[in-house]
Image (spheres, rainbow, N blue to C red):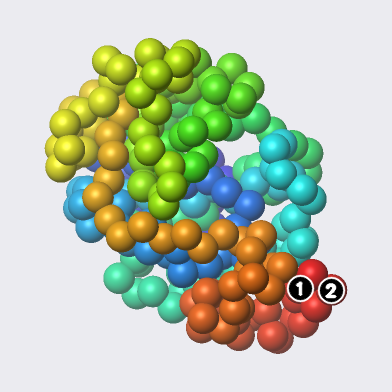
Amino acid sequence: MSCLATGTFASENDLSLIIVYGGTFDPPHLAHLGVMQAALQQLPEARLLLLPCYMPVHKARPGASAAHRLGMLSAMLAAEPQLMGRVQIDDRELQAESPRYTVDTLAELRAELGSDQPLAFLMGGDSLQGLSSWQRWRELTNFCHLLVYPRPGYALPQEGVLGQFLAGKWLPNQQCARLAQTPFGQACLLSGTLMPAASREIRAGAASMHSSVPKSVLKYIEQYSLYQNS
């Protein structure tokens, strides 16, 4: 596993839940940080793996380079001492330098971590709504659990192919800790404040950069004059 660590994860014999949080992080903003903090607060034994993608399959080309997006994530984590030892950055998709499907990366992680390691993929409710458009989406829960953070305007799928797929997988509210009891195959909704901020809105100026990104990230953006032409 190629990781840039803010701390070192426990030994391979530690089978506490690993949460994978993927995204473009262009730039990483306060909502990203809030989702991470909520997941780690509600799952106090879990560890989190940040997985920045090189080129999103369903989105426009990133505004910042892979190196700068990695730099912004590193700056953000360095300013959050409470995350030390619980969060790492896995840069494998950046190193690939080509678009990769989430299912392929999760299959790779599962092969590396072994069949017994509890693994969850963290996504927002908006991403969950579009899950059925993802490549080989039905296979995702063969490798991991789905851990969902609520987003304003996006209800949990109840009908259609996605609703049917998820129907037998949901754990009761407030019981996401049970994800650590099995390696994969379930889904759980985190509780938390609805956070609408999106990176595209920040780049477009719809959300103020100064109020939407951590100070450490803003300092990095200003240092390297990023998003000047967004």
- Tell me if residue 91 comes above or below residue 117 in the rendering: below
The answer to which of 11 and 129 lies nearer the viewer is 129
* Disc 2 residue type (three-letter): Asn
What element does badge 1 sit on? loop
Side (left or right) of 90 relative to 170: right
Residue 188: horizontal and vertical position, in percent?
Answer: 28, 34
| Residue 146 % position (x, y) | 37, 32
**Label of residue 229 in the image:** 2
Nearer the observer, 58 or 129 = 129
The location of residue 95, given as percent across then percent down, is 71, 46
The residue sitting at 34% across, 65% down in the picture is 83
Which part of the image, by quadrant, shows the C terminus?
A: bottom right
Tell me what residue is drawn at x 31 percent, y 29 percent: 187
Three-letter amino acid code of the residue under disc 1: Tyr
Residue 12, x across and y down, in percent: 33, 37
What's the CA distance linking mark 1 and mark 2?
5 Å
Residue 21 seen by the camera: yes
The residue at the point 49 percent across, 33 percent down is 129
SS of the residue under disc 2: loop
Q: Which mark is residue 227?
A: 1
Looking at the image, is 33 positioned above or below residue 123? below
Q: Quadrant of residue 88?
A: bottom left
